[in-house]
Amino acid sequence: MLVEHQSTAQKLLSFRVHHYLLNFLNSFRKQNPDKALPAVYAVVFYNGERSPYPYSFALQNCFDDPLGIMEEVLYYDLHSIDVNQLTDKELKQQEWVGPLALAMKHIRKKDLTDTALEILAAIPWPMNRCEEQELLKSLLDYLFSTGNIDDTKKFFSAINQAQIPTRLMRELMNFEEAVKAMVVEECMEKGMQRAKRETALKLLAEGSEIAFVHKITALPINEIEELKHQPSAKPEN
């Protein structure tokens, strides 16, 4: 049971109580991931000056919702779209969510390059509004961060032969530059890490203590301890 004491009248009291309730249930879920959530009864003890309580205790009345959307969201099954059950043709007919849904459907392909190009070629967005540019950026981020497009150079080279609409090209070129910058940054980071490891190996080979190597290279202690077991880190006799 969830018991709440309230001494003043508040319009959003129901929302606050439900917030407490959901926090409790979320904590239970984290501690018991394989168990069903427990039923919790909530009650408010009110002793304010304004009586009877002047506001609604119904959660849906906390919302500015003249269409009654929240009642459906709160008390009925969630709406879902299983993209795997829809054909590519059906998804392409959806102007706004279609390209993103197509990406979700095919994201696990071993090589997503050709499919990604097909999705981009079929995008119907005019690209003259910020919302459309943000949608395209979200789509590209999803394709590259989650999908298997290993050869980015090949992907961007193929764009010119993929009949991509001209209205998309500027955004794609901007994204290409961002990807190139990210790749350069990753290479630099890998190079710095390699140099740190090489420095650590030399210091260890000279008999330096792990704490000193950590101070010089900023490598984690456990990584330095692993390096210490390598033959090249053994001090020379």
Image (cartoon, rainbow, N blue to C red):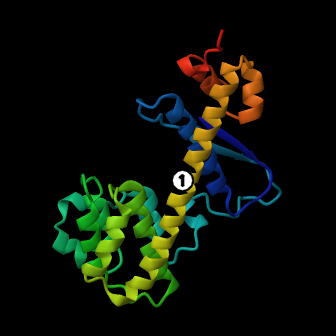
- Answer left or right for 158 relative to 130: left
Local secondary structure at mark 1: helix
The residue positioned 48% from the left and 28% from the top of the image is 32
Of residue 93 and residue 184, the one placed in the foreground of this image is: 184
Q: Position of residue 160 (x, y in %)?
A: 30, 80
Q: Position of residue 233 (x, y in %)?
A: 61, 20
Return the residue at label 1: 186
Q: Quadrant of the C terminus?
A: top right
Of residue 1 and residue 92, the one placed in the foreground of this image is: 92
Quadrant of the rendered structure where residue 43 is? top right
Question: Looking at this rendering, what residue extends furthest in the front direction?
Answer: 237
- Answer left or right for 218 relative to 139: right
Task: Identify whether 162 is placed above or below 106.
Answer: below
The residue positioned 21% from the left and 58% from the top of the image is 84
Q: Quadrant of the N terminus?
A: top right
What amino acid type should be assigned to the residue bearing mark 1? Glu
- Answer left or right for 163 relative to 75: left
Q: Position of residue 12 (x, y in %)?
A: 67, 61
Looking at the image, can residue 84 be seen? yes
Q: Residues within 10 Å of mark 1 (few under 14, many from 20)?
A: few
- Answer left or right for 156 relative to 197: left
The residue positioned 67% from the left and 46% from the top of the image is 44
Q: How many discs mark residues in the rendered view?
A: 1
